[in-house]
Image (spheres, grey):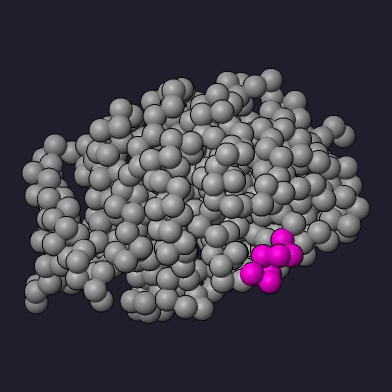
Amino acid sequence: MSKQYLLAIDLGTSSCKTAVFDRMGKVVDSAGSAYPVYYPHPGWAEQDPEEWWEGVCKALNTIWKNGKVSPEDIAGVGIDGQSWSAIPIDRDGKVLARTPIWMDQRAKSQCEDASARIGSDAIFEVCGNALLPSYTTGKVLWYREELPEMYSRIDKILQSNSFIVYKLTGEITQEVSQGYGWHCFDMRRGCWNTDMIRSFGLEESFLPPILKCDEIAGKVSAGASAQCGLPEGTPVVAGGLDAACGTLGAGVLHSGETQEQGGQAGGMSICLDTYKADPRLIMSYHVVPDRWLIQGGTVGGGGVMRWFEAQFGDYERSAAASTGKSSLVQLGELAEKVAPGCDGLVFLPYMSGERTPIWDPEAKGVFYGLDFSKTKGHFVRACMEGVAYSLRHNLEVASEAGADAAVLRAVGGSANSLLWTQIKSDITGKPIVVPYADEATTLGAALLAGVGCGFYSGYEEAIALTVRETRRHEPDPSVKEAYDHAYQIYRGLYEDLKDRMHSA
């Protein structure tokens, strides 16, 4: 039988997801595996890359055990991963330390020192991003200063998806869409900038060769085959950033098209065919050649609701069996009973500092407007509205930078909520189209593999065959006044409280 399927591996913050797609973009089978985030100190958030690999192997072997797909039918493998990892490996490929992840803020002083020494404008001119603790660069500078013995043993620094490529193939790579984690990456030309490498005092040898996202990085090795079940020799493409793969999986190919992200983190990605950077936002390459993405990446996303459910959803979890509804669905029903604007309850979703557009690692989550009339439903809706206000803030800043979004294409678990998606449409004033909400990111990774191994003739064909809209939301003009008023409170709260946040 000919190889008729594509395999996608998605390395998220809370779990890995694996999915097998047919040529038309239908999920034939899927499986996932969770892994922890470690918080050893305030402001730290790290993960063990070997636990990612264990999760990948577990999920893949579950798929093979299910029997819907034979591993011999896989034509190619695409991998997407979370941003801004800094995985140190030695010459033998051993992981030397847990990697700080995108939420980690430990490198604040190293970033401030480097910005003062090199110059913030000079750094931004090369890479199109401000030097901040979330990015890969600051984490490596932190290694050098705080873990000098470990630093001396580093052979290469890998990103999340390139680490899984290495585990599968033995090849050490860096693809272009994750280059934005490094401030020695030339965002205009898509290559390493040797002058900036020297300015930071980094080891050029740490930096892997840069590949196109759909370029075949290697083939599954015999050792990896024994662990994950994929046949030796299966092609593996370099893959890409999860947000960029989700953008591709949402059908975003052309300038001005926009993805709205509703995973653990929130945000948006606007596709550009010309370079436009703004220090308040994030600039990266798209996984599609000759395109950039200007992004808003916020801490507050689907993770806000996961946090709320974990802390305050005991009743809903206990009632799930009798009602036949998940705890999150029940919480959404409570929120639906509350009026737009939440009767004055406003939430700042800065649950681990905040990224764009305020870039404040000391920002705190806040509920404002409590009184005795507020119910659990108010809190749930306030969480949803707060995340939507952060999206609006990012879209407004992008517009100021010359990148306007017309229609948002929503992906991620949050897009499964009709209420939450409508709230986002109402608050931003943008129509929202929902394609495959849960599978957009893995689909994007699969499409990279499909183009790379010739499964599709190109991205236009791949999108035409696989991306289908499931529903559309239009903003409701009758709630605009209530949301505009609440949004002004949202914006003012941070300005009023940021000094207090920094002194806490």
| Residue range of the region highlighted in magenta in the rendering | 148-154
In this orientation, does residue 198 appear?
A: yes
Question: How far across and down, in percent of the image, does residue 351 sit?
Answer: 34, 66
Above or below residue 215? Residue 438 is below
* Residue at the spot 72% in from the left edge and 49% down from the top edge: 205
Q: Is residue 15 magenta?
A: no
Give 481 or 199, whichever is nearer the viewer: 199
Question: How far across and down, in percent of the image, does residue 414 sit?
Answer: 40, 52
Q: Is residue 149 magenta?
A: yes
* Residue at the spot 47% in from the left edge and 61% down from the top edge: 110
Dominant SS of magenta comes to helix
Give 471 or 347, whichever is nearer the viewer: 347
Above or below residue 369? Residue 469 is above
Q: Is residue 9 left or right of residue 126?
A: right
Figure quadrant of the C terminus: bottom left
* Residue at the spot 47% in from the left edge and 78% down from the top edge: 41
Question: How far across and down, in percent of the image, does residue 11 sit?
Answer: 60, 55
Question: How far across and down, in percent of the image, does residue 130 sit?
Answer: 40, 46
Above or below residue 40? Residue 443 is above
